[in-house]
Amino acid sequence: MRRELLALVVFLAAAGELLSDGLPAMRYHGVVLEAAGLKYRPHDDIIYPSVVRVEGRVAKPLGKFYLYYAPHDMPGGICMAYADKPEGPWHEYANNPIIAREWPPHFKVSHVSGPDAIWSPDEGKMLLYFHGENPITRVASSSDGVHFTYEGEAVTTRMFPNISEASYGRVFHHRLPGKDNRYVMLLMGNDRGTRRIYLAWSKDGRKWESRPTPLMNPPAGTDQVAGAALLRWAGKLYLTAHANNSKAGFNVGYDLYAAETDEALETVKPLGKFFDRTRVSPDNPAVMSPSFIQDAGRLCMFFNIGARLRNKIALALSTPNHEH
């Protein structure tokens, strides 16, 4: 009987039916956007979803939600899609990319990618972060979420010791105790070959201060971590990120991991895997770059699936009416 019960617990955990240390179980819903069929399609991949509710915020929105994404490789291009519900259907904005790799007189880079958007209620504007070459994360602003004004460089490798990349940042509304900030950024820094998660904070979303030491190191059994998100749920604060062991192969074996953290973002308690790549399919090589919104009592997680340069954007949903 005990063996049968243990087998049932293992099965339910793999199926996403159990809660883990306060985090909701996430059920895989499916692909919501892919390169096939898009008008702007320089490559067969799209990555790094960032979803923002614009209903009631921008005048005459195209949909209730805007999804920002980009191809990975040259020339990239920050793109937008819109929908009235997380499950879609998602519609490509007609004039993508909304930000290209050349923006005279501000910059000319090989590509732009890795978008992350956040709504600033104080300004009534969207702030959009993205990178060109990996040492610099840039920021632009918009009152309608479509037409952007360049705001400059936000975070660079010069702000951290020994790192060669400062990109794939996500920005959140969060006040650090004892600091006069409104925003925090979780970004990927390449520390002499090991990618770790670093922390920066800002009052206005343009000028940033940084902590020199990593916030989150690769979880046990992995040697690279990136694509971090900050998630408040059921009275606790969590970090989620994708991680893999690069020794197992090039750009394969990514799962989503979780850790509990404190309000100061100083302590990190690893919790293990949050979402395994095989929940998508037995042979799926990666789940990456989680982005969360809450809708209709559910936690909605957008993320990448699939092989490198063949990535698609997928959705997982929690059971409705979790306490949060």
Image (cartoon, helix red, strand yellow):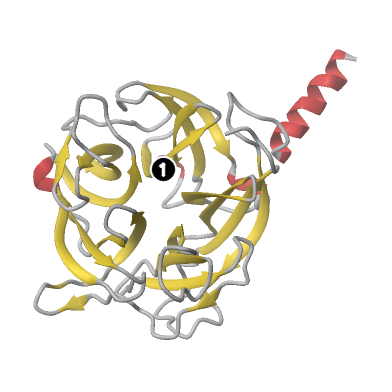
Q: In this view, does 33 lie above or below 272?
A: below
> How many numbered tags mark residues here?
1
Residue displayed at 59% across by 41% down:
276
Please indicate, yes or no, whether residue 215 appears anywhere in the rendered image.
yes
Q: Position of residue 233 (x, y in %)?
A: 53, 33
- Mark 1 nearby-residue class (10 Å; few <14, some 14–19, many ≥20): many
Q: What residue type is labelled 1?
A: Ala
Q: Position of residue 227 (x, y in %)?
A: 39, 47
Residue displayed at 31% across by 38% down:
197
Q: Position of residue 60 (x, y in %)?
A: 45, 76
Q: Which residue bears the numbered disc 1?
A: 229
- 191, 204: nearer the viewer: 204
Q: Where is residue 305 in the image (x, y as percent from the top left)?
A: 54, 57
Q: Tell me the quarter of the image containing the N terminus.
A: top right
Q: In this view, does 266 lie above or below 254?
A: above
Side of 157 where 290 appears, left or right: right
Please indicate, yes or no, whether residue 220 appears anywhere in the rendered image.
no
Q: Residue furthest right?
A: 1
Q: Is mark 1 on a helix, strand or loop?
A: strand
Q: Tell me the quarter of the image containing the C terminus.
A: top right
Residue displayed at 25% across by 37% down:
199
- 293, 199: nearer the viewer: 293
Q: Is residue 157 above or below residue 323?
A: below
Residue displayed at 45% across by 59% down:
52
- Quadrant hosting residue 216: top left
- Quadrant hosting residue 142: bottom left
Side of 63 where 12 appears, left or right: right
